[in-house]
Image: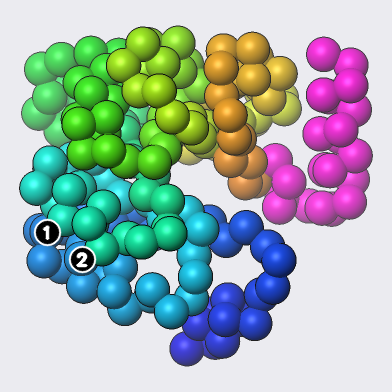
Amino acid sequence: KNGRNFISKLKNKIIFADLKLHDIPNTCVSAIKAIKDLKINYLTIHISSGLQALRACKKVSGKTKLIGVTILTSLDNKALKEIGFNKGIKKIVLHQAKLAQKAKLDALGCSAQEVNVVKKVFKKEIITPGIRLDTKINDQKRVMTPTKAFKNGSDWLVIGRPITKGSIKKNIRKLIDHLNND
């Protein structure tokens, strides 16, 4: 409830709701309808929810841009094998990018390491998490620096802990220095 109140009071801000919807079509659609009044600009949904769910969500999303989430940046090929996938990350992400294009999603979320692969089949915005300024990768596996991510073709960067852990002011200065000096 407090989060809903906070978001409803935001004005002139881009709101990115990283909900990572991942369920049957009806449940995903219900979730979108439940937050429609908040005028969210971007909303994430797992591409692995399937084409039917993606299309159903796109149909009801209105002005909210749907971001298709590919393989999480915390996973590597070893982790995918453990889950039961028999293809490598790049092949799966390319396949998911084609599915996102087919579902007419507005943006794609993938590791900066796969941007050059997905740009061949997905022609809209590319948003990349797993951005790191140094060697502290935490629980991420597929990371990249901001400069390299932009050079690879990322349109938007998602930077979490490198900014939020410790002094936010110092971390933002560090990010600006990194971008100016790289």
Q: Is the residue 92 above or below the residue 99 in the image?
A: above
* Residue occupied by mark 1: 25
Q: Mark 1 touching mark 2, by CB under 8 A?
A: yes
**Is residue 114 visible from the viewing direction of this image?**
no
Q: Please name the residue shown 68% across and 63% down the image.
A: 13
In magenta stretch: residue 171 = yes
Q: Main secondary structure of the magenta part?
A: helix
Q: Is the residue 6 above or below the residue 29 in the image?
A: below
Q: Amino acid under label 1?
A: Pro
Residue 73, percent from left and from top: 42, 32
Q: Is mark 1 on a helix, strand or loop?
A: helix
Q: Amino acid under label 2?
A: Val
- Of residues 103 and 133, the one nearer the viewer is 103
Coloration mode: rainbow
Q: What element carries label 2?
A: helix
* Residue occupied by mark 2: 29
Q: How many marks?
A: 2
Compared across the picture, whether 102 is left or right of 114 comes to: left
Q: Which mark is residue 101?
A: none
From which residue to which does the magenta span run?
Answer: 162-182
Q: Please name the residue shown 56% across and 17% down the image.
A: 153
- Of residues 157 and 53, the one nearer the viewer is 53
Residue 85, percent from left and from top: 12, 24
Q: Quadrant of residue 22?
A: bottom left
Residue 55, percent from left and from top: 17, 48
For the residue carrying disc 2, how many other residues have a C-alpha within 10 Å: few (<14), some (14-19), or many (20+)? many
Q: Please name the residue shown 73% across and 46% down the image.
A: 163
